[in-house]
Every structure is written in structure tokens, then in C-alpha cells.
Image: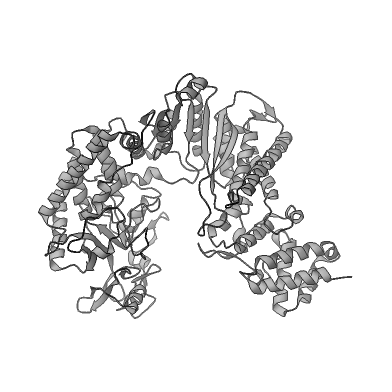
Amino acid sequence: MQQLGIMRFGHSPRVADLFAGGGSIPFEAARIGCEAVAADLNPIACMLNWGAFNIIGGGQDFRLALAEAQQQVIDAVQAKLEEFDVESDASGRRAKAYLYCVEVICPKTKYRVPLAPSWVISKNLRTVAKLIPRPEKKAYDIEIVTDATDEQLEAAEKAGTLVDERVVHPANPDREGVALSVIRGDRKGDAGESVNLLRKWDREDVVPRKDDVFGERLYCIQWMRDGAGEVDDDDDGGAASTFFAAPTKRDMAAEAEVTRLVRESLPDWQMRGLVPSQAIAPGEKTDEPIRTRGWTYWHHLFLPRHLLFGALALEQIAGIKDPSVKGALLVGFCRTLNYMSRMTQWMVRTPTPKKPADVVNHVFYNQALNTFYNFGCRASIGLVPSLKKAFPSIAIAGDGKVTTREASAIDSDNDIYVTDPPYADAVNYHEITEYFIAWAGPLGRKVFPDFVWDSRRELAIKGSDEKFRTDMVAAYKAMAAHMPDNGIQVVMFTHQDAGVWADLAAIMWAAGLRVTAAWNVITETESSTKKGNYVQGTILLVVRKRLKKQNGRRMDIEGEIEDEVKAQLRSLNAIDEEWRAERLYTDGDLQLAAYAAALRVITAYETIDRQDVGSDVFRKLAKGEKTVIRDLIEYAASVANNMLVPEGFPVSLWRDLDSSSRFYVRMLDMEHKGATKFADFENFAKTFALPTYQQLMGATQANKASLAGAIRLEGKMMEPGGFGETPLRRVLFAVYKTIQKDDPKVGLSFLKTELGQDYWTVRLTLADMASYLSAKTVRTRPDESAAANLVAEALRVDRL
């Protein structure tokens, strides 16, 4: 690698990623011998990059020192917890997990109702919770039933007290229950904002107050059996080594003791930086815990048990003398944070070899701060594995540098930039990582003083407006300015919206860059659970400085785009045909390839028709306005669409179809292949630039989506203009009439009346469409398939 760098650049290649995130790109660059630079605005991302270079690539001696320190921290924390005696029962058995639920007062019965969508605790251990009404207390006892029968398991599954966001419980004879929104007091404020009756928690709060709308209750404990070994993994099921029981008076006393300890210690811990003291800043994602629970400080997201464990662990980590080992332990502690929160769902699951039993889930199973009405809390025995987890060891041939800064502020020259930039709809990492910054920040400022320990939301590149585009131009212009003329950038991009690709083209253009190549790299493979138009690949755009100033005529550019798109798709289809093991490229991938091909052509020119079209990136676009670049990108999409003919559909007919008909024909093929995900329909609608596709849908559930068939459409969408005048719509209505009367002559009569003398000209075209409709609905809508076949045959044999 060093020799290759010297041949091209005169030195070892310098590779930078200015949106480094978790650090895979800089790490791999360093591993193969490059000088790597990892930059990110977020201190948690920078800490992960530091960890990749210094923990995974740190060598055997460092790893031994880290393992020794991990055990030292764990031993000290467990010794302190044993001293408090808050995680064991009277027999000395250790707790593995605590199960909690939210409680509310039902306004109809005045009962205090524990909430859960199901009261099954473990299918594997046949354990359920059973609600026992106590009329004199207007409350429920919760009995834990072990060795439950099949009938009891089924009853517990159906006995959930939270059904479709409604509180339903045995003491209320009205099975419709009460909407949770009514109990919460949801309404619109004076300014139209969403407000409710939830009390905003104060800084000193660690548990709900008695008069809060949402209470909290410990209702079950998972215990380790006598002689059970340690938990070895974050997801360790070990079902046979545990059992469940209702909390005893002793357990509740231990719970109260933990709360007392935390309440008394909280001010001191916060002052010393051992638990979070920050308020939660409102935001798109951070509004969720504020709005749904009234939590206003980050420590409110954690149970007293979590706060106790976290404070004890950070206290021990802070006492480690070696700063690198201390930094590595802080990285490990952030991993532990993913398992300790009021937002860790109790997952009841059927055992499999990979996932053996029920478990307290991690917080970020998706990129959000999700709150739950029943949740689990890992005891220390369930948190320790993440704290002492061994990191892999991989030798690094080069070296790595980490810096916390925005991309536009890069101050070092680099030969190669490899970036995966934020998309217009990117995850709000700048918000959700504050969950980790709140804990790690105080110690992080001492261990990593060069990092800025703030999410700096205002500097994050986000959104989809002119501010987003301007910020992106600034970032890529800075990279171009700190790159030699023979330097290279690789930009990863996966997005199916033509408008976002148009923005990317304008951004590259305004930054003085041109796309010279595009590689579609397969990142996922087909499986029985993934069918449809999901993107299997990522486009890698090879970008260089635009050194020539040349003008292009739009007419000529359109011709170049057409040739480039056709060549790109022919190349990918040839690869697909040669690779027979599975389908490599979906239509979505081919669409992305078409966009990338267009970028290769467009960004080669300084101006189009003597106009600096890249300047559009800096201004606010009117609603519905299309720039020259957007028009050219959509032209590339239309060229691709003309080539993406569904299997079994006549090629000669495909070219003449409108967007609605193409969408319908394509989705008939996808339904035939088993696609039922609404996301597939949504993505294809984007592919065909069809904003009104939902009118053509029969069902829009997330995993049970389908087209509206001939019967469902009936006489809808028959008005002049648009889909109503298309041959496909007329065939669908003819099939509907045929089903009604069980006679294809009725369908033909409609077609003849509707089309007049044109009927004889398009008769065979209509027959081909009816045959395709029949073939593609034989499994999904057999009645429609049979009727469409009758119509097709009647059309073919019809004579003057």
C-alpha cells in the first residue's frame, strides 16, 4: 500500500472520512497501511473511532491490561452491590432481571391498572402473570403462575390491559376500555402544539410520584437457580438456569433501599459526573420521552437500579490510572448503557439455537428513544457481560488520527476521501447520541480533552432544504480544497428518490467535483423474508476534481445520459445473468445505477446552455419546482424505466404505458412473487414518480399490502384524464363486469362502447393485458384471474 501511494501521490496514501460514524472506513484504511483520518462532529462517534484504532488495533499487551482493568472494575462494583444486599433473595440466589409495568387510574372504575399488551412472561418456562382484582383497594394483585397450561398461556396472551392504545381490564365491563390518550389528557395547546396532563419530572425525581398519571410497579423478578453459572453474553438466554417469581416483602424492601440510596446520593453523583445531570433538549427524537412520560432530564430514563450500577461503574473507571485503559473502559461502558434504561423492552420469544430464551432487549434496536408500558431491567449479572466483553484484535499496518470537527472545517490535506454522507432523511444521530454523551461526557472531557463533548446539533448537516444543500457543498468543497488534483473521493449513496439524487448532483457540481465512475456493490442478498424492491446494493460514486471548464447543450446531454444509462443497465443485467445463484440486482438497484450514470454525464460540465445550473443548490426552491438537474435525473429514470420490463409483459406495450399503469403492472408481478410489504409499493411509486399511488392500493398495512384488484376498484378512477382513460384501467373494469355477470360478453360490450372504432385497433393489446392480469393474479385473486382469462380469450376470438 505504501508503494502504491508513493507511485501515485509521492507518499503513503492519506485517507480521510469526515462523516466517520462508527469508524469502519478509517479503521480499514489504517489496517491496510494507509494514514487514516477519522473526523466526526459527534464525540461518541470519535470515541468509537479512537476505540477501533487503539483497542482493536492496540496489540496484545494493551488488551491484557484492559482485561485486567475490566475485571477490577467488575469485582469492585459487585462487591459494593453485595454489601448493599439489594440483588439477592433470602436464600442467597441472585437476580437476573426485574420486570416493571406502568400503572394508571382507570377513570371509569377508579382502579389502579397495571399495563401490558400481554401477561405472558415466558413461553419457554411456561410462566404468566395473572391479575387478581382487589375491589376494596381498587387495585390488582399480580400473581406469577409457573408451569402454566396451554390454556393459561393463551388466556394470558389475550388478557393484556393495553389493547390498541386503550386500557382494558377485568373490573371494567366495557370491553372497549378507555383510550390512553384520554387518561393522559392529550389535547392541542393554544398554539396548536400537542400537550397533555403529564407532570414534567423535576431534577431530583428518580421514580414517579404517587399522584402522577403514570405510576411504576415491579411485578416480577427473574432469579438464577442454585448452582447456575455466570451469564456469559449480552443476549444469554439460559432459561433452564432461571425461574420467575413475584416480588416478596424482602424484595420490595430492597427496591425501596435502592431508591433511597439513589435519592440521597444523586446530587453528589451528578456533581462528580457519575450520573447524568443534563436536561433533555427538545428535538424530533428527544421529544418522545418528554411528551410520552414527562421525563425532562437524561437520568429520568433510568431506573434507580441503573443509576446505582452506572455510578458505581463510572466511579471505578475514573480511578484507573492508565488514560488509554480508562478510555477503553469508557467505550465499554457506553456499550453497557444500551442495556440499562427504562426503554429496554422485555422480549418474550420462542427459543431458537441463536436466541435461546426471553431477554431484556437493548435500547437502540432501532434509531429512536422508544418508551414502553412494561419493560425489563437487567440486574448486575446481566450487565456485566457487556462491561467485560472482549474486543477483537486486528493488526493495523498504518496509523489513525481522530478529530472532532465538522466536515467543512477540515485542515489537513488528504489524497483520498471515502464518505457516507447524511441523506436528506438520515437518522438523527446528533439527538439520540446525547443519551450516551449525558453519561460519558464528564469523564470523557478528562480522558479525551481534544474532543468536543457536545452533540452540537446546530452544526449537524440535516434536512432537505437549501440549508442542507449549502452545508453539504461547504463540506465537499473543503474536501476538494484539501485534495491534490489527482486525488479521489468515493461517496457512498443509497437513496431511491430522484429529488435527492438531483440534490447530490447539484452538490457535487457546486463543490467543483465530477463523478467519473459508479460501482454498485451488493451489500445484502435475497432471502425468504426480503422480497420486493428493497435495495440490495450501495452505489459507490468515484469523484474527482472538475479541472476542465466545458459547456454542454441540454439536447446533447440528454443523448449522452440515454447512452450511459443503457450501457450501465446492460452491464448490470449481464452480470446478473452470469451469476445464476441468485438475483443480484433488484429494479431499485438498477434505478440507482441509472441515477449514478446520469451524474457521470451531468457533473462533467461546468455549464449547461451557458447557464451555471449548480447555483440552484443555494436557493429555496418553490413547491413543485424542478431544476435543470432534476429534469435530467428524471430523464435518466425514464430511460431506465423503459428498460425495466416486468417478467411476462410484452416489451412493445411497456414503452407506451403511463406511470400509473407501469406501477400497477410492475406490482402485479411483485405480488405474484410474494411481495406484501407496503415499503415495496412505496419504493416502486418513487421509481415511477407516482405520488397518487395509494388510490391503486387495496391494503396499506406494513406487511399486508396489496393492489386494489378489479373487484375492489369497481367503477372508481374511471373519470377522463389520467389512469381512467388507460387501456389497463378499461381492461380491469371489463374484468369486473365479467365477474359480476359471469359472462365475458358483458366485459367486451363495455370495451366496444368505451373505445368505439378504436376497439378493433387495440383489441389484441387489450387481450395481452388481460392475459398478463390473469397470469399474475392466479394466486392472489383467483376469481379475478379466471375472469381475466375469459376476457383475454374472448378478445382474441372476436371478429367483425
Which image quarter is the C terminus in?
A: bottom right
Taking the spot 43% from the left edge, 36% from the top edge, the residue there is 25
Q: Is residue 231 visible?
A: yes
Q: Quadrant of residue 403?
A: top left
Say which of 229 and 296 sits in front: 229
Q: Is residue 593 left or right of residue 795?
A: left
Image point (20%, 43%), residue name: 314
Residue 625 location (% of width, % of height): 62, 43
Residue 408 shown left or right of residue 554 in the figure: left
Residue 412 versus residue 689: which sits nearer the camera?
412
Residue at (28, 33) in percent of width and height:
448
Residue 33 occupies quadrant: top left
Q: Nearer the viewer, residue 133 or 255?
A: 255
* Above or below 606: residue 713: below
Mark yes or no: residue 215 visible. no
Q: Nearer the viewer, residue 519 or 659?
A: 519
Q: Position of residue 442 (x, y in %)?
A: 24, 38
